[in-house]
Image (spheres, rainbow, N blue to C red):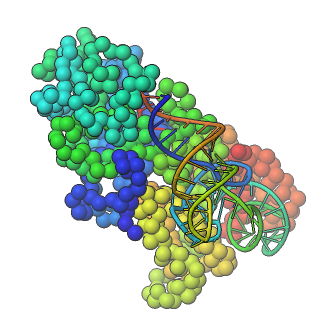
Amino acid sequence: MALSFYNTLTRKKEIFEPLVPGKIGMYVCGVTVYDYCHIGHARSVVVFDVIYRYLKASGYDVTFVRNFTDIDDKIIQKANEEGIPWNELAEKFIEAYYEDMEHLNIEKPTYEPRATEFIHEMIEMVKELEAKGFAYVVDGDVYYSVEKFPEYGKLSGRKLEDMMAGARVEVDSKKKNPFDFVLWKSSKPGEPTWDSPWGPGRPGWHLECSVMSRHYLGKTFDIHGGGEDLIFPHHENEIAQSEAAHGVPFVRYWIHHGFVKVNKEKMSKSLGNFFTIREVLERYHPEVLRLFLLSKHYKSPVDFSDATMLEAEKGLERIYSLLDAIKDKTRNSKEVTLSEEMIREEFPELYEKATGFSARLKEDMDNDFNTAAVIGAFFELTRTANRYLEKLGKKKAKGAQAALLKLTEEVFLGNGKILGLFNQDPREFLESLRNRKATSLGIDVNVVEKLIEERAKARKEKNFAKADEIRDQLKAQHIILEDTPTGTRWRVELEQ
RNA sequence: GGCGGCAUAGCCAAGUGGUAAGGCAGCGGUCUGCAAAACCGUUAUUCACCGGUUCGAAUCCGGUUGCCGCCUCCA
């Protein structure tokens, strides 16, 4: 099957064919840097990170551009509130953004341009639009005239007449049509400005994406993405600007992802019901957030709550426990050369599932980037592998056994890279989950370890009454013990 | 008012014409000193509701209800 995905522009799933065979140009709208990123931003970034990884893994040479909007009303306003220069504020939040991205294990795009680096090119584009009759000037502001662009509304499926009927249109006497938008904005005293043919001012928001995408990807490129709230007016306006200026199609495939919701409501700045990435990462491992965000199809809304996050955490714990067990079983096993058939015969069911995994992943990812189905496949593989471990019993794995387990581990690690999961050392991951929760409950790790030692002694002496007493005591503090052949392990279980 | 999306077990969630993946929770069992973890079995004759097309529909079409989003900055 060929890669296909939903194209907002045509409103259907289409087989993807790049403009230039083997190459892909992809542009995704980044953030406006006036605050810390919330988990809605995290979804955007994770979704396109996975798409980027998958396209590369599929053999494409991908040029991926994600911008920073570093000049904008909100930045100016926030900087004024904080009494610092606007560019200092932008810089601060770009740094914070990079910290968050590193925690989330986001691959760096090919280019991450900032709007302010392209002021000159933006002015050039406004001039082009003015020369072609798509723009008009009023008091130092330059507006785009939507009525001059017959296809205006084609992305969002609206018609200008229909929108006119809508009540919530601001009245701005400067505009010829209420849907005209600003290309160049004259600046008020004290605001950052750049010189232009229309006087001192700054660019309108939509312009930067038209200009930066042209700079890096050309007048027509393959994929443009963002949150579904950007469809109108942002992406609609980008199309209007770019196609009017260039006379060629702007973007071939548009990808929009759904929102993160909280209590069934859209999470947003204006509603005040948002969680920043850093807040969430204090409580959950970054991979838990990734798994949570990828466990539902990217177009559907996803509901953020402790219950849904804890569920993701348990699932990830299950997989890492398996990876840990495999490491344990194969430790010190010697490398031996074996035929595929010998490995297969060890446990055909696991061998088939493991060796067939990449094809399964490709099938699911080719089908509109169905990460939820891929995650389901990982859990199926987990069960089969656990079944095999069960069969092996307590002995260390040798020969074909070890080879089969190593093969399985490789499948998790290799394919996990596409989703950006299973990237941690299993032991460290499990301990970090535990310590994170222990800390939040104010549990002293040393005290726990001491009690476990005490219990081990009691068990050795067959003093099970005392051993159970200690276990119950710890259980009351949400600490669950697991006795394994290699000693007692413990974890923290929070109530849902 | 205009445009669009969604509705699958207690919960989360795949499945887009061929007879319901997966996870969490629950129940029964194996293992265990007892547990936990893991494994085995079990949990939707049915996919909001009503019609229609079809040999066959959760999947297509029409209608109804409910929830949500965009139309203003927004991932």
Residue in front for this viewpoint, A106 or B7: B7
Judge from the rendering whether residue A26 lies leftward or rightward of residue A453; answer left or right. Answer: left
Q: Image point 32% across, 46% down: which residue?
A: A224
From the image, which quarter does the N terminus of chain A lie in? bottom left
Residue in front for this viewpoint, A382 or A229: A229
Residue A247, quarter of picture: top left
Q: Is residue A74 in sight in this rendering?
A: yes
Residue A45, quarter of picture: top left
Residue in front for this viewpoint, A251 or A267: A251
Q: Is residue A388 above or below residue B37?
A: below
Q: Is residue A411 above or below residue A291?
A: below
Residue A360: x %, y % from top left: 48, 69
Q: Image point 75% across, 45% down: which residue?
A: A477
Q: Is residue A126 above or below residue A442?
A: above
Q: Is residue B23 above or below residue B72?
A: below
Q: Image point 48% across, 75% down: which residue?
A: A356
- Report how many numbered discs are placed on residues in the image: 0
Judge from the rendering whether residue A56 lies leftward or rightward of residue A297; answer left or right. Answer: left
Residue A46: x %, y % from top left: 43, 48
Q: Image point 39% across, 28% down: which residue?
A: A163
